[in-house]
């Protein structure tokens, strides 16, 4: 579709090379998105919502962690402490991000908006959103790694 939409005015001889480049970029984007999703899925995989929480559209990871941390029948004190520390660490790490990176990160990964929606809200290009998210993700991963949390 991209080939037809954007390059229909190009000479026929250029189309195979353009198609190849579009295909390469699409594959690269797919794996880049997969890597980013995998990064955050790995980090948050221990906090899968319960069936009741899945039914609720208002599921919030931080609220779930806080309620789990305060529920002594679910976790032992050691787990409660770890969850509480992780919540605080994540909140502090996100707060230290530059404003635009924090905004892009929260809209994309917390609010689960796509790149186009995020770009409209932020008033910038889709490329800028991707850049801000990538930088935020790398910065957060580095901060978490510095505190001994491997991804």
Image (spheres, rainbow, N blue to C red):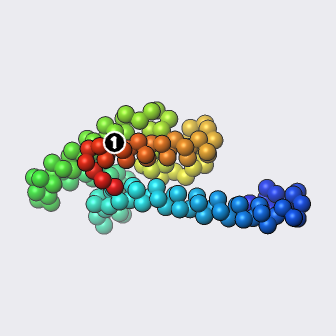
Name the quadrant of the N terminus.
bottom right
Question: What is the x, y in percent for residue 18?
Answer: 77, 61
Question: What is the x, y in percent for residue 5?
Answer: 79, 58
Residue 67 visible, this orientation = no
> In this figure, what is the number of numbered marks?
1
In terms of depth relative to the viewer, which is nearer, 25 or 47? Answer: 25
Residue 12, quarter of picture: bottom right
Label 1, residues with CA under 10 Å away: few <14, some 14-19, many ≥20: some
Residue 17, quarter of picture: bottom right
| Mark 1, secondary structure of its residue | helix
At 25% from the left and 48% from the top, the residue drawn is 148
- Left or right: residue 10 compared with residue 52: right
Residue 139 visible, this orientation = yes
At 89% from the left and 60% from the top, the residue drawn is 11
Q: What residue is shown with label 1? A: 143
Name the quadrant of the C terminus.
bottom left
- Left or right: residue 19 compared with residue 128: right
Q: Is 25 above or below relative to 146?
A: below
At 28% from the left and 60% from the top, the residue drawn is 46
At 11% from the left and 53% from the top, the residue drawn is 78
Question: What is the x, y in percent for residue 28?
Answer: 59, 60
């Amino acid at each position: 579709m991209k080939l037809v939409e954007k390059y229909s005015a190009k000479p026929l001889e250029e189309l195979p090379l353009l198609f190849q480049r579009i295909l390469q970029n699409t594959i690269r984007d797919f794996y880049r998105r997969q890597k980013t999703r995998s990064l955050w899925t790995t980090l948050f995989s221990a906090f899968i919502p319960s069936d009741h929480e899945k039914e609720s559209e208002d599921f919030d990871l931080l609220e779930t962690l806080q309620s789990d941390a305060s529920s002594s029948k679910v976790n032992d004190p050691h787990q409660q402490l770890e969850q509480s520390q992780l919540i605080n660490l994540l909140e502090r790490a996100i707060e230290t991000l530059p404003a635009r990176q924090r905004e892009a990160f929260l809209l994309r990964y917390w609010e689960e908006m796509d790149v186009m929606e995020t770009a409209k809200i932020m008033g910038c290009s889709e490329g800028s959103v991707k850049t801000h998210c990538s930088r935020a993700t790398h910065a957060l991963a580095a901060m978490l790694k510095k505190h001994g949390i491997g991804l």
